[in-house]
Image (cartoon, helix red, strand yellow):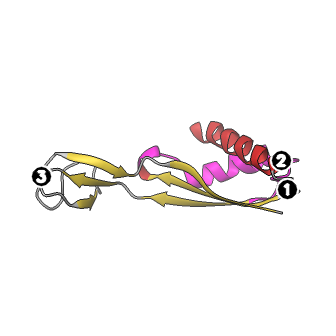
Amino acid sequence: MHEFAIAQNILAICLEYAKEHHAQHIQRITLQFGQMTGVEPEALKGCFALLADRTMAAGAELHIVVVPLTARCQACERVVAIETPHFFCPVCNSPQLTLVSGREMRIEQLEVV
């Protein structure tokens, strides 16, 4: 379960930021995870809650945005959503795709008091 390690890293980053800015409590964390990362949002939330207990992030709400897999087709130059693991352009059927989104792992917003 790689969600546990991801939750550890998110917590460490957020706690460090909160301490640097003299916050008392972390209320909400907005995260972006690309579809290809394979992160299970509910598993991540559970791991985070377990790790955050007894820290200034205890009870913090995790809002997770899943970023869809998109690619730019080198043949027809369109940015397209990729729905299958075959990685072919759904417009022209070309396999010449360059990923645009879907592999992100980022803390988008941190709300503290």
Measure how far apart labels 1 and 3 are at the Cα level: 50 Å
Residue 69 at x, y percent in the picture: 36, 54
Q: Earlier in the sequence, mark 2 or mark 3?
A: 2
Residue 16 at x, y percent in the picture: 77, 43
Residue at coordinates 75% horizontally, 48% vertically from top-left? 17
Residue 23 at x, y percent in the picture: 85, 56
Taking 92 as reference, is 6 above or below it? above
Amino acid type, label 1: Ala
Residue 75 - label: 3
Measure how far apart labels 1 and 2 are at the Cα level: 6 Å
Measure how far apart labels 2 and 3 are at the Cα level: 49 Å
Residue at coordinates 61% horizontally, 55% vertically from top-left? 42
Relative horizontal placement of residue 48, taking residue 31 as reference (left or right): right
Relative horizontal placement of residue 109, taking residue 66 as reference (left or right): right
Label pair 2/3, CB-CB below 8 angstroms: no
**Which is nearer the eye, 36 or 78?**
78
Residue stretch rendered in magenta on the structure: 36-60
Going by the picture, which residue comes out furthest to the front? 21
Q: Which residue is mark 1?
A: 23
Residue 34 - label: none
